[in-house]
Image (spheres, rainbow, N blue to C red):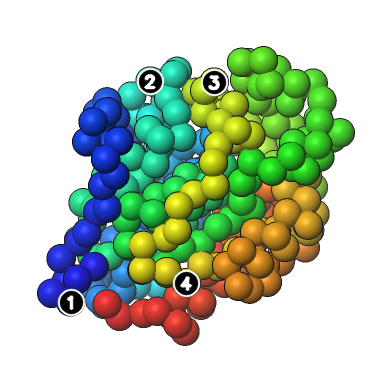
Amino acid sequence: MSGGGERVRVLRGREWARPVRPARREVLSVLPELEQGRPPLLFVPGFGHGAWAFAEHWLEHAAGRGFPAYALSLRGHGGSEPAPEATLRAYTHDVTQVAAGLPRQAVLVGHGAGALVVRHALARYPARAAVLVAPVLGEWGTLGAALRRNPGGTLPALVGGGLRLSRRQLFSRELPDAEARRYAARIGRAGRRAQWQLLTHRDPEPAVGHPPVLVLGSPDDRVVPPAALTRAARRHGGAPLLFPGMGHDLMLDARWREPIDAILDWLEKEHTPA
């Protein structure tokens, strides 16, 4: 963002020469009752999840603490337009387009593989800050852990099929079975090209403006190993904020308030009014 408050989006030559096809995108939002000048939060769900995953709890909770809260369904997810051949580049385009349309410079919050999309978007959109929640950044160690813990659900994704995560991978034992089944039934799949690109993508380009980045997750996450959380945080000069006893889907798990309150506390302490 420039000194006059103008939003900036960084374009690369390839984007001009080979633009991403437009797609209808679902964006859900909850706004505070009183405007407090706090930066908007744009939540980006991981592969298979839609904006609904944040609309269950986190949007309303963030708005209740004064933050305008938005959640995007990447193309092919949730209520957005179907896109079976979507790529990481297309997902990144979705995030930068929606962020650029928000009223103020936004904080990008990515969960799971959505954290990788956010990292790519940071090279094109000058975010106020970023939060990577249980980030799946395409490391081979994460794939190895998934193959050990859920081979039947992981192997199909390596040959173009859908990735199927188990209840034990997504949620803690504290979440009632009925809720876990309801959430699991809503999880779809990402584009097969995007799934493969999780392992073959290049590292994201440097972030515009070097925004502060918070990494958080659970040491008991059965998708992202603790070592992967540590590596992700070190890339941004810090240590991960950990929530023991929770599953991969922190925003849906039984103790969902703890991580979102930690995120909002961090933002209030470091980066509030615009």
| Mark 4 or mark 1: whose residue is earlier in sequence | 1
Q: Which mark is residue 3?
A: 1
For marks 1 and 3 on the same chain, the one whose residue lies earlier in the sequence = 1
Front position among marks 4 and 2: 4
Q: Is residue 7 above or below residue 101?
A: below
Looking at the rendered structure, the secondary structure element under dot 3 is helix
Q: Residue furthest right?
A: 148
Tell me which label, 3 or 2, sits earlier in the chain. Answer: 2
- Image-quadrant location for residue 46: top right
Residue type of the residue flagged with mark 4: Pro
Q: CA distance from mark 4 to mark 3?
A: 32 Å
Residue 135 is at least partly visible in this image: yes
Rendered-image quadrant of the C terminus: bottom left
**Mark 3 in CB contact with mark 2 (< 8 angstroms):** no
Which marked residue is nearer to the observer: mark 2 or mark 1? Answer: 1
Query: Mark 2 highlights which residue?
Result: 82
Residue at the limit of the structure toward the front, as seen here? 13
Rounded to the nearest angstrom, the CA distance separating label 4 from label 2 is 33 Å
Indicate the position of residue 192 as horizontal and vertical percent values.
Answer: 54, 20
Which residue does the image show at 40% across and 56% down from the upper left? Answer: 122
Image quadrant holding the N terminus, namely bottom left
- Helix, strand or loop at label 1? It is loop
Q: Check disc 1 and give the amino acid type.
A: Gly
Residue 192 - label: 3
Report the residue marked by disc 4: 212
